[in-house]
Image (tube, grey):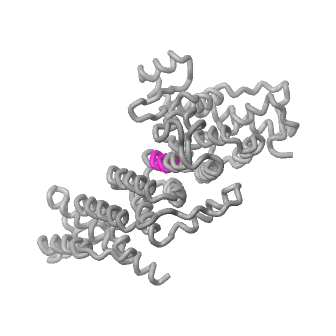
């Protein structure tokens, strides 16, 4: 008997009122598939006339609205509601497990809701995850229930609550759901085409290319909430490994570069882009493709990637990254450009331009840049240079520091790769 082989004692007074409202809100088929969930302190919601009015109008405990400009379904709940969802789901699931009786149709939907609630509030609860997997199994991994679960988990991963956003269990589950959907939906979208926005459209006409694009954008929306999220970046590399056409990869890479330029401080994202560009020539994502095959429920040969001649795309991406990094002193962009320069043997003047920039700065001011301590040392006295009252010198120093750090780190990384 599986974990779902349980039912509640008819005498128990357990309810899932808040949990049901939350799940129904997320899965409303007339809302945008793209979600953003925010858990806010009670006082912020109570003191906001707009949020209070939305809840009063709908007689709900949760704010739900479609942003037509960003095509995003915005969901806001208080910390009290968040805690109540946890308590309801926890009590229901764990009391049901204790009773160990046969599941019946009445309790099945509630058990499913409770697992969803618990995965949101305590995303490391492996019991809830196992029970949720049994829900999929009981539904024969059908498209409707897979989409339902996929969009719920995608929404959770955009939440501002860090433990949910950065949950290794949820990210691993999201990858599985993506692969299982990919296995059963058509290659191309039909009907609404690239304009698939609402959840009911996805179920009826979404295709594989849109699925990949949606999963990648889920990673980026997660990074918006919590930059340098290791699990989001790792999942991003996983989804990129299955882009099978040069046209789609070109579109996605250009979007990634634009996003990175808008968020220059996210070093992890620059490294993902760098590794992905290298993969165009070196098949560096082989391990991610093997992971994909492990998740897949189908015995099928991997489709050969139709990437054609990638030289033009690689050069375009490199030049855009390099020019932006040189102009802004973005450390992540500089390091990524350096790594591409070394790994792909792109012979241009990047290294000489960067070395000249920071050496000229050091010579002009008779200083030495200490990249470890991120400070300046006066060459004459050996003392640390005070930059507090010299705004122009501080700006020039920050640019030179980024360039010297990137140069040193890129050389060290290249040496490590050669030694391994």
Q: Tell me, yes or no, if residue 26 can be seen here.
A: yes
Point 48% across, 32% down: residue: 74
Q: Position of residue 324 (x, y in %)?
A: 27, 59
Q: Is residue 251 above or below residue 107?
A: below
| 209 in the magenta segment | no
Tell which of 268 and 336 is nearer to you: 336
As drawn, is 363 to the left or to the right of 161? Answer: left
Q: Position of residue 412 (x, y in %)?
A: 38, 77
Q: Tell me, yes or no, if residue 169 can be seen here.
A: no
Tell which of 383 and 61 is nearer to you: 61
Residues drawn in magenta: 215-222
> Residue most toward the bottom?
419
Q: Position of residue 47 (x, y in %)?
A: 43, 23
Query: Could you tell me what secondary structure mostly forms the magenta stretch?
Result: helix
Image-quadrant location for residue 378: bottom left
Question: For the image shown, how many numbered marks are present on the structure?
Answer: 0
Point 29% across, 76% down: residue: 347
Image-quadrant location for residue 112: top right
As drawn, is 383 to the left or to the right of 97? Answer: left
Q: Is residue 293 above or below residue 100?
A: below
Q: Position of residue 239 (x, y in %)?
A: 53, 56
Q: Is residue 398 above or below residue 21?
A: below
Point 22% across, 76% down: residue: 352
């Amino acid at each position: 008997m599986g974990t779902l082989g349980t039912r509640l004692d008819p005498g128990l007074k357990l309810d899932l009122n808040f949990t049901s409202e939350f799940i129904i809100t997320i899965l409303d088929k007339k809302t945008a598939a793209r979600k953003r969930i925010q858990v806010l302190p009670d006082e912020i919601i109570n003191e906001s006339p707009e949020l209070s009015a939305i809840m009063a109008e709908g007689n709900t405990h949760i704010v739900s609205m479609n942003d037509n400009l960003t095509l995003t379904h915005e969901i806001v709940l208080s910390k009290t509601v968040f805690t109540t969802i946890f308590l309801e789901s926890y009590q229901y699931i764990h009391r049901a497990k204790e009773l160990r009786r046969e599941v019946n149709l009445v309790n099945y939907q509630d058990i499913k809701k409770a697992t969803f609630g618990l995965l949101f509030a305590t995303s490391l609860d492996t019991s809830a995850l196992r029970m949720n997997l049994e829900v999929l199994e009981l539904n024969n991994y059908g498209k409707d229930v897979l989409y339902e679960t996929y969009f719920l988990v995608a929404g959770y991963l955009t939440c501002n609550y860090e433990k949910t956003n950065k949950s290794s269990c949820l990210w691993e589950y999201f990858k599985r759901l993506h692969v299982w959907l990919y296995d059963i939906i058509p290659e191309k979208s039909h009907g609404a085409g690239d304009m698939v926005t609402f959840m009911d459209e996805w179920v009826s006409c979404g295709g594989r290319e849109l699925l990949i694009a949606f999963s990648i954008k889920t990673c980026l929306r997660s990074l918006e909430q919590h930059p340098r999220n290791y699990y989001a970046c790792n999942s991003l590399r996983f989804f990129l490994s299955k882009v099978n056409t040069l046209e789609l990869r070109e579109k996605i890479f250009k979007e990634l570069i634009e996003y990175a330029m808008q968020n220059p401080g996210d070093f992890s994202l620059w490294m993902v882009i760098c590794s992905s560009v290298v993969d165009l020539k070196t098949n560096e994502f082989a391990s991610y493709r093997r992971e994909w095959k492990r998740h897949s429920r189908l015995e099928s040969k991997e489709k050969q990637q139709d990437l054609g001649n990638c030289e033009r795309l690689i050069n375009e991406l490199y030049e855009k990254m390099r020019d932006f990094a040189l102009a802004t002193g973005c450390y992540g962009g500089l390091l990524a450009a350096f790594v591409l320069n070394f790994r792909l043997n792109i012979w241009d003047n990047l290294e000489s331009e960067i070395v000249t920039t920071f050496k000229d700065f050091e010579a002009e001011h008779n200083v030495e840049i200490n990249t470890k301590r991120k400070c300046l040392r006066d060459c004459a006295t050996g003392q640390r240079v005070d930059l507090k009252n010299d705004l122009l010198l501080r700006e020039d120093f920050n640019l030179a520091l980024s360039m010297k750090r990137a140069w040193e780190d890129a050389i060290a990384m290249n040496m490590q790769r050669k030694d391994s």
